[in-house]
Amino acid sequence: MAKIFCVANQKGGVGKTTTTVNLAAGLAKIGQRVLMVDLDPQGNATMGSGVDKRTLKHTIYDVLLEEATVAQARARSEKCGYDVLGANRELAGAEVELVAVERREARLKAALAAVGAEYDFILIDCPPSLSMLTLNGLCCANGVIVPMQCEYFALEGLTDLVNTIKQVHANLNKDLQIIGLLRVMFDPRITLQVQVSDQLKAHFSEKVFNTVIPRNVRLAEAPSYGLPGVIFDAASKGAQAYVAFAAEMVERIKKM
């Protein structure tokens, strides 16, 4: 069965989508079967995987409302080598429509269970808020990958996220845990970033991934071409770092 991971952080602009699509592409490159689930109504992970959200017949919205199965709604990204369960602006309405539904927080878990045997990894790109969509992701996940910049406000946001994960673990999903913290957009020339990185290592020790994703122009350019950086420019430092991160993830999962 697939291992399911949310890429989550309640702070916006920390590279969640960049991490999700590049980790998916990196895992696919090293031979893993991957489904990438876009739970953000902006649909950036969908577009960044080379799938046009405007042309999708079915999306994650239809899956959550049980109007389509994952098998019916997923699309193949041939360039990237993984499957995409896409999203578009329709998804914003799902929050309201799910309010009156029984076990609304478990809709995604039930849907993914039907295709779990077809994948090694299912990666979920969560929106930057604790919404019903994020809750659906957390309720079906084995763990959370937390991308974060090494800045002071990122530490504050991390505290909020840890508390949220504890609450979901206690009440809704006993399997949920933090798999690891991924340092992204890292620039070793900035003293503060080095200091915050050291603080993270001291406080969270083995929960901090060894791989560090550098600040990289090619990673930033890639979405405008509808591709992850790993596919757009495989030789760039950012792409190589994400492939190394994918390999580290596979090793970490073996120890779970």
Image: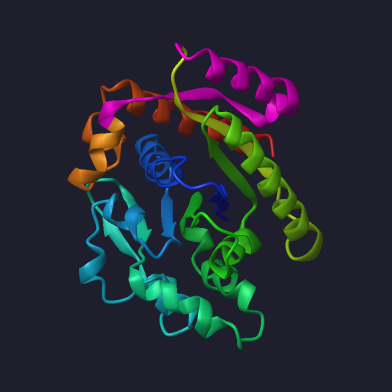
Observer-nearest of 13 and 208: 13
Disc tally is: 0
Left or right position of 36 against 153? left
Q: Is residue 129 above or below residue 244?
A: below
Observer-nearest of 123 and 54: 54
Identify the image quadrant of residue 194.
Answer: top right
What residue is at 34 percent from the left and 60 percent from the top?
Answer: 43
Observer-nearest of 188 and 71: 188
Locate the C terminus and report the quarter of the image it occupies.
top right
Identify the image quadrant of residue 164.
Answer: bottom right
Left or right position of 13 against 88? right
Magenta span contains residue 86: no
Q: Position of residue 98 (x, y in %)?
A: 55, 82
Q: Position of residue 28 (x, y in %)?
A: 37, 42
Q: Is residue 182 above or below residue 2?
A: above
Does residue 69 appear in this view? no
Q: Is residue 212 above or below residue 139?
A: above
Residue at the bottom extreme of this rendering? 100
Q: Position of residue 62 (x, y in %)?
A: 41, 79
Image coloring type: rainbow
Q: Main secondary structure of the magenta part?
A: helix
Q: Which residues are magenta?
A: 189-218
What residue is at 22 percent from the left and 35 percent from the top?
Answer: 232
Residue at the right extreme of this rendering? 170
What residue is at 58 percent from the left and 36 percent from the top?
Answer: 154
Locate the N terminus and report the quarter of the image it occupies.
bottom right
Magenta span contains residue 197: yes
What residue is at 46 percent from the left and 59 percent from the top?
Answer: 118
Does residue 28 appear in this view? yes
Q: Position of residue 73 (x, y in %)?
A: 35, 72
